[in-house]
Structure formats: C-alpha cells, structure tokens
Image: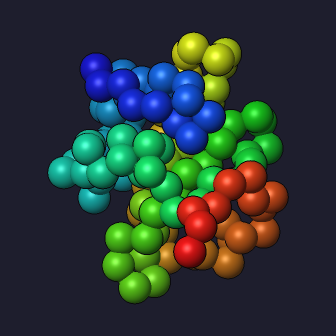
Amino acid sequence: MEIVRSKNGVPIRLTEERWIHITEEHSEMAGLYYDILETVEDPDVIYEGKEEELIAVRKVEKGKFLVAVYKECSSNDGFIITAFLTRKERQLKRRRKVWERSK
C-alpha cells in the first residue's frame, strides 16, 4: 500500500482492495498505479465531489485526463476511492473548483 500527501497535507492511501476495484472496473488503468498516486499528490486541478470526496485531475495528453477520486477522512487519514481516464473535461468543470495549479 502506497501513501501520498494531498494538497491539504493529508496522507492518502491506495489500498490493495481499491486498486483491484479500479483495475477491474477500468482495465485501461492497469499500468497507471503510480500515475494515480501522482495525480492526488500533484494534480492540475481539484474539484469538489457530491459526497465530500475530492476529485483530482491531471492532463495525460491533449484532450485526455486522469481522474483520481479520494476522501480525506481526517487531517491525518484519507484514501483513494476510484480512478479513471476521461475525455469529458466539460463535465468535470461543472463542479466547484477547490484548487488549481498556478500557471
């Protein structure tokens, strides 16, 4: 199990159970374990989810984004819920932005 720190400084873990879930639901994610962790640790933008989760997004190529959904349970614990690739940037931008990398 790997742990990275979110932009809020919260340790976020990617458990084996969640990794299995991610790769079973989204087979294209199989080789992207460390990319998921990097997306949480160093995203381009973070949006607010509907159930208090955070949605970290990184551009992986023109028009394609890696999305990592995670929850900060407390100031010293959090976990990745799921991750996937998408081209639907417009849907992400409908959410409230909570952090963005300065350009």
- The C terminus: image quadrant: bottom right
Tell which residue pokes out farthest to the left in this image: 31
Note whether 40 is above or below 75 in the view shown.
below
Task: Give residue 97's position: percent from left, percent from top.
Answer: 75, 59
Tell me the quadrant of the picture where the N terminus can be found: top left
Above or below residue 53? Residue 67 is below
* Colour mapping: rainbow
Who is closer to the viewer here, 32 or 56? 56
Between 5 and 50, the one lying in front of the other is: 5
Residue 36 percent coordinates (x, y) = 36, 47
- Residue 83: x %, y % from top left: 45, 47
Q: Residue at x 36, y 47 (%)?
A: 38
Q: Residue furthest front?
A: 102
From the viewer's perspective, is 75 left or right of 82?
Answer: right
Q: Residue at x 43, y 70 (%)?
A: 59
Q: Quadrant of residue 46?
A: bottom right
Question: Which quadrant would residue 96 be assigned to in this image?
Answer: bottom right
Q: Quadrant of residue 41?
A: top left
Q: Is residue 8 left or right of residue 95?
A: left
For the point 67% across and 66% down, which residue is it?
A: 92
Q: Residue at x 64, y 17 (%)?
A: 75
